[in-house]
Structures are given as C-alpha cells and as structure tokens.
Amino acid sequence: LGEYHPTPTGTSLIKTTNLFHTTSEVPLEFHVPCLFRRPSSQASQSVSVRRPFPLSHGTTTLGFIFQGGVIAAADTRASAGGLVACPAVHKITPIHSHLVVTSSGSGADCMLWERILIREIRLYQLRHKRRLSIRGTAKLLSFMLHPFKGTDVCVALTLCGWDKDDSLIYVCSDGARLQGDIFSVGSGSPYAYGVLDGSLRWSLSKEEAISLAREAVFRATHRDAYSGNNVDLFHVTAEGWKQRQREDLKEEYYRDMEKKGKKIDLKMQKLPK
C-alpha cells in the first residue's frame, strides 16, 4: 500500500494513499501507524506465559438509529471476573463533535485504541483541512486493528456519528467492520436486544428513543451480573452530540418496582370480594 517513513520519535509509519474515492481536489491520504510490532522470538515467549487466573469481562453497550438521529447508551460497571473493579467508568467516549464510540472488551485496550483513534483523526484533519468521514474512520480503525487478530487484544467499538447522514458502525479487534441500524455489544446484549427488538421503530420521538435506550440498559443490568450501577446516554444529530445526565439504575429499579406494585393493587381491586 505504501512506504515506511520514520518519524522524529523513531516510530515507523505506513503512508497509505487512495483508500477512499473522491472527486475533491484535496488528496485523500492518511498515515496508518505501525504499532507494537514485536520480533517473532518475543511473540513465541509471550504465548507461553500463563495468567494466574482468567479475567472474564462483561458490559452492556448499545446504539441505534431513529428518525431523530443516533442514540448511544451504556452501563458504567467495570468488572474483573467476579470483582466490580469500578462502578463509574465511562464506556462512551466522544471522538469529535459529531462522533462518539461505545466500548466493550478489555478496559485498557479500549482506552488505548480510543486515544489512538482521536489522535489519527486529528492528524488527518490537520493534513487535509477537513474531518475524516464516519465510514473512513471505521475503515482506518479496522486497518489498524487487523494485525492484532488472534492476539490477546480485546476491543469492540461501536461508532455512533453523523457526517452527511447518521451512521452506526461496529469494529472489533480482529478487524471486522459491520454497518447497521442497531447494535448491542457485551455480556448484557442479549437482554438489551430483547427490549430493542420489541419496541424500536424508525418513527420514535426523541423522548421515546431515550426512554427505550434507558429501559434496554436497565433490563440488561438487572439480569447480567457484569453490568450495572449507572447508565450513560448520548444523542447524536447533525448539530453534534449531546450527553444526558448520568442516571443511577438503582433509582430506575425502585421506579419499576413501584409501577409493578401499582399494577398488582389495581388487579386486586378488580377481584370480586
């Protein structure tokens, strides 16, 4: 695809050209960083090192498109096996004014690759005087992650953004790149999909879409031990992203129990005495 160019810091870069077709007079090219390449001898040694105990991680993140834009929502619990490592992490990260990403997988890997993605998008904007499209961002991230296929790198990012239109693209650490209208990722995703599949429709209002996303995360955290604590929610439109205030899922649980109690009371009143 291109040539290696040493940077002032000594890190090699691959200069990649003509990755996107365009009619603009500005040439489209960006530098894909050549990251963390290890000699084969070191790689073979690292494979033989066993972890003292397996760390299973879980989460609940989701994103969907409706007539009013793109909704991104996630819980805030970081787990390490049966341990709640942190109850208040941020699993939705703003990349720029019109793009946020939801992250699931290894917390350290996700943070690293989000920072790399922010840097590369900013460098692209400085070189070409315009921002990289959402699809172009997903393709760049996929290219950078693909060399780590089959390693212990565990990253699954859902890009929720808006450039010429709303976009929702899922990219994971083996380089896979999928575009769709609804994604839920993590150990709580089956429960979130159960709520979304039953109520999601294109004609939802903004308030209905926000309520649906909050309900989906709440139901997932109620059944999935690796998800919980709070819910973060972002709404992305042509004007940019807006973040709602973080909500405690404990309060949502109490409200839900109160509703169920009222329904039971109504049924009891209707029974013949």
Image: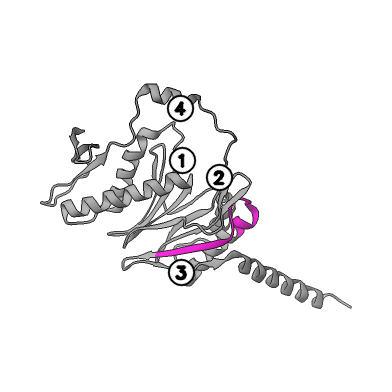
**Label 2: few (<14), some (14–19) or many (≥20) C-alpha neighbours in 10 Å:** many
Give whichever of discs 1 and 3 has the lower sequence position.
1
Of circles 4 and 1, the one toward us is 4
The reply to whether discs 2 and 1 touch (Cβ–Cβ < 8 Å) is yes
Which segment did they paint magenta? 219-235
The reply to whether discs 4 and 3 touch (Cβ–Cβ < 8 Å) is no
Q: Is residue 81 above or below residue 251?
A: above
Q: Amino acid at mark 2?
A: His
Of circles 4 and 2, the one toward us is 4
Q: CA gap, disc 4 to disc 3?
A: 43 Å
Q: CA gap, disc 2 to disc 3?
A: 26 Å
Residue, disc 4:
46
Give whichever of discs 4 and 2 has the lower sequence position.
4
Q: Amino acid at mark 4?
A: Ser
Residue 166 visible in the current orientation:
no
Residue at 47% x, 58% y is 90
Residue 150 visible in the current orientation:
yes
Residue at 41% x, 26% y is 43
The residue nearer to you, when weighing 182 against 51, is 51
Q: CA gap, disc 1 to disc 3?
A: 28 Å
